[in-house]
Amino acid sequence: MSLPLGASTSNLCYEIRHVRNIEIHYSDLLPLIEGSRKLPSSTVNAFGAIIQGQNITRDGSQTSDVLVLSSWIPTLATGSISATYTNGTIEDHLAAASNHIPIFSTEGPRWPCWMLPLCGGSPSHWVLGLVNFTTSTYGIYDSIPELNSKTWAKPLLQQTIGAVKIINSQPEEDWEKWTFTVHAPPPMERQHDSWSCGLFVMMAMSAFKQNMSFDSAGDTYKNDTRKRALQMILELPYVTMSLLRTYANQLTLGLQGSLVLFLPWKNTSDDDVIIVDEPQTAPLKRRHDQSISTMSMVKGIDSPGELRTKRKL
């Protein structure tokens, strides 16, 4: 697939994009550029974050009743990965999704509809988890329902929602009173390959967010979705690796804790910073699916251009 105007492979190799609390590297873009490769969680979550960003304005007002959660929350809820400085916590990912607005009010969920990508099974397969607190319905969108992914996705969805509610001091759900549904494309529109499940999840996200039927999520629209997702992600603010090296080489050794560095993210007016751990000696460590390195983004510290130490929590 040809790249959008102004983008080149040689440049993308040195660019790190940023949305919510997610880094997107060149390797995360390759499945969208080349096709025929399964999407990593960073790419799927970035797409969901962009959609979620369209729902919440800077002053915190809501423009949608849909909350898009990260696929990292289920893995943290089940203990598949540990809450660490790099992986974050469930609370971190909830705050990133809601723009630090409490997701529950005294009347219940502020966003009555939730969706979150789920990955499981063997071989691994992406499905989209769906929750509607208003109608007490939940389920999954599955591009290959013949895999019977509900056997692992249903308990995973229940455990994830349970963990989120416990953290927010909310009562447990009585799942016996809820209705579970598996949504799937028509047989001719289902996934017919081994790699495009993440694209189907993206299509389902768009349909669910717009309160549309899942008829627009099918094999016919797969390549259009790949192009659209790539364009959306390429429009995110980014920084170049050469700039990172320049700043890292300027850091003074001997400071205690992590070094906090403000960088001029392109295409954005936000004041963004990067935390760099031992920049001159430590190699970049990537998450298990290449989603985030040890250089993790945080926001809102003092003013651009400042450099100060920050204690790890």
Image (spheres, rainbow, N blue to C red):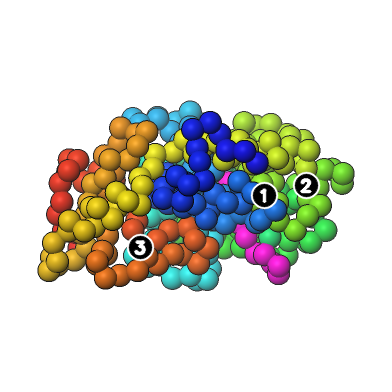
Q: As shown in the figure, which amino acid type bears the numbered disc 3?
A: Thr
Residue 152 spot, x, y in % from top left: 68, 65
- The mark nearer the N terminus, 3 or 1, is 1
Which one is in front in this view, the residue at disc 1 or the one at disc 2? Answer: 1
Residue 99 spot, x, y in % from top left: 38, 41
Residue at 81 percent across and 52 percent down: it is 192
Q: Tell me where the magenta segment starts and ends, as one range.
A: 115-124
Identify the residue position indicated by label 1 in the image.
35
Q: Is residue 14 visible?
A: yes
Q: Secondary structure at mark 1?
A: loop
Image position of 293 (left or right of 225) = left
| Depicted 259 relative to depicted 263: above or below | below
Q: Secondary structure at mark 3?
A: loop
Identify the residue position indicated by label 2 in the image.
184
Residue 260 spot, x, y in % from top left: 21, 54
Give the farthest residue toward the right: 188
